[in-house]
Amino acid sequence: MLRKSTVLVFTAVLAAVGAENASAVSVLERAGNPFRTAANNQEFILNKQNVNANQFGLLRTHDFDAKVETQPLVVQGGAGADDLVIVTTMKNQVIGISARTNQRLYEVDLGVEADSNDMDAWGHTPTWGIAATPVIDAATNTLYVVAWMRKNANDNRYRDYKVFALNPMNGAQKSPPVRIFGQSQEGNGCWFNDADAVFTENGQTQQYVYPKLRAGLALTGNNGLVLAFAANGESFQGGRKNPHGFVIAYDTRGLLGQAGFSREPGIFCATAFNNWGAGIWHAGGAPVTEGDMIYVATSNGTSNNGGIDLAESMIKLRFVPGAGGSRPLLQKVDWYKAFLDERTSGDGCLWQDNKTEVSCGRSEINKAGSDWDFGATSPMLIPGSNMLLQGTKDGLIYALNKNDLGHNDRFNKLMFRPPLVASYDGGDVNENWARANRLNASIPCPDPGDVDDGTRNWFLPCSDLRPENNRMHHIHAMAYAKRDAGRGIVYVWGENSQLKSYNFFTAPDTLPTFRAQGSEIASGNMRSPGGMPGGLLSISGRPAATDAIDFNTAIVWGVYAKFGDSNKSFGDSQLVAYDASTILPGGKLRRLFRTGDDHQGGLGLMGKMIPPVVANGRVYVMIYRLAPGTDRVIGSQLKVYGLKS
């Protein structure tokens, strides 16, 4: 039941979005579309001529009394004559704001959030509630939100996730919420929110392993609502206490209370019950969906025993709606493992005396250790092609064939080989570069003549050249500008690196080529590794004849930590806009706008994993607010940029 609600009712209908104004757009999910390209090809107001310091700037701000970890959603025409901006917070609030007047139109509180003293390793976040970007189903005018809350308002020991189906125009419930609970369907014994996974300390019994929902919500084309979970911690704990990665999917018709459809979920567990890890977090990015197919990328954990333990993997699932009121299914269709792990199982890796041929992932025994997360970004599906891209903490981008992921064939099934070294790990440069060569040891290196032009060595691990200034690191976001059926541009901004762009081709075995880069360095005052998260990106422009962006109008937007780290601490951030198509001498992108000057970011403390949202002439950016003199987050602030007059 809602604790409080202040609501204004609007007459706008989501199914009619764009019907009256073909030049307007709504942003209804993370990264703007189910392929996660972060591209808006319906931006008719902002352009390369007016995005500059004289005409473009800060219009207004809106403060929240809780931390925001989710991307804002924008409903075109949802606030009368103007856009409705929907923001969710760690206090389980759902808030609707008029984009033009800045008026808070409604605020709904979904339930008592958890005290996060055992959820936040750095102690920055006092409460833990909604941490995953919601999704809006335009066909039914439904906002789906998942909230993390206490079972009992006065007891923080036991907690539940609940799925809410709301009217996005006013926040009203469309049906009762559903508690997420159940056993996986693979026969591997995994339970989500396992009631038996408890421990007693100082006379207090409480849940042992908490799932963490950080990846954005997604919708399939056949009425599936997809949730992808990591865990609070990635280390082996033994038996019922082990953390697991889960994919959970509901039939939206059941969530809306339609007769004949189950309100129970399909549940997929990415590792065996006795093993651990394979969490799905995607740096907040949502799974890719296409029709009834779902693509997720997992992170640290046990792997290497065929298709059972799928840590450090790409997983393809099919959502199968239930028939006659039965529970829906998540069928494993295909999978890919990026690399063989460097350590095999031993004492402390697996449950009790289990020493099967299952490694502990890229980790030290009994802990996450090296932290090589393959699933450091959400996957990205290149529209109109079979190419599925994945950015990793290795600083690599893998190109997979969505129709044949390849299982353990780590190289021969890649759509181009070797994988693209887009933003390389900058720890020990010799060790990491040697590791890249080991990854590619089964591939013949290109002829040396292919790497002498000064550009191709950007992405060939076989080159003798070393990563640029030992300053390339994790990838946490990508964006894609489609030019035509066979080619496009991928933008990526890794930690301790600049924004980089690459020409991508959908034909098999056609290697990407380096195109151009930006000027600013993420966390430029820090040695790598360090300086999370690099840059978070989006692209705007007018449409081309197909579903592509008119590349001559395209703008690349980035939010990055100019100074400092936005993971263990807080980074002073900057919003920057680049001309996506113009290349200046020296291989530089032409900058159009940035906040601040060379000595400060000018934006505020970076919202850790929240990309800029561009819609209908406005750019929405979220930052943190701290209690004075502390590193405790007391809230967030939405900054709205646009044309000044």
Image (cartoon, helix red, strand yellow):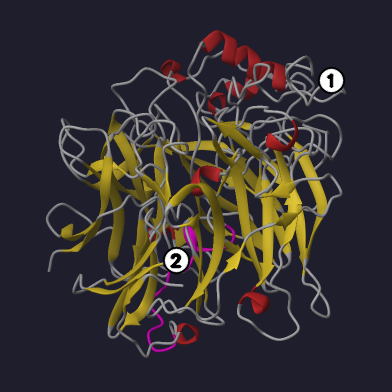
What main secondary structure does the magenta stretch of the protein show? Answer: loop
Residue 385 in sight here: no
Residue 519 belongs to the span the image colors magenta: no
Residue 372, position in %: x, y? 60, 27
Q: Residue at x 50, y 19 (%)?
A: 467
Q: Residue at x 79, y 44 (%)?
A: 335
Q: Which residue is mark 2?
A: 41
Q: Quadrant of residue 98?
A: bottom left
Residue 64, position in %: x, y? 25, 57
Residue 564 in sight here: yes
Q: Which residues are magenta?
A: 19-35
Residue 222, position in %: x, y? 71, 73
Residue 93 drawn above or below residue 325 = above
- Taking depth in this image into account, of 159 and 30 the one nearest to the observer is 159
Q: Name the amino acid, label 1.
A: Asp
Residue 559, position in %: x, y? 33, 44
Q: Residue furthest front?
A: 203
* Mark 1 or 2, closer to the camera: 1
Q: Residue at x 42, y 20 (%)?
A: 471
Q: Name the amino acid, label 2.
A: Asn
SS under mark 2: loop
- Taking depth in this image into account, of 210 and 640 the one nearest to the observer is 210
Give yes or no for contact between labels 1 and 2 (Cβ–Cβ under 8 Å): no
Q: Which numbered tag is attached to residue 353?
A: 1
Q: Which numbered tag is attached to residue 378?
A: none
SS under mark 1: loop
Residue 26 belongs to the span the image colors magenta: yes
Q: Quadrant of residue 362?
A: top right
Residue 409 drawn above or below residue 616 = above
Counting the numbered discs, the total is 2
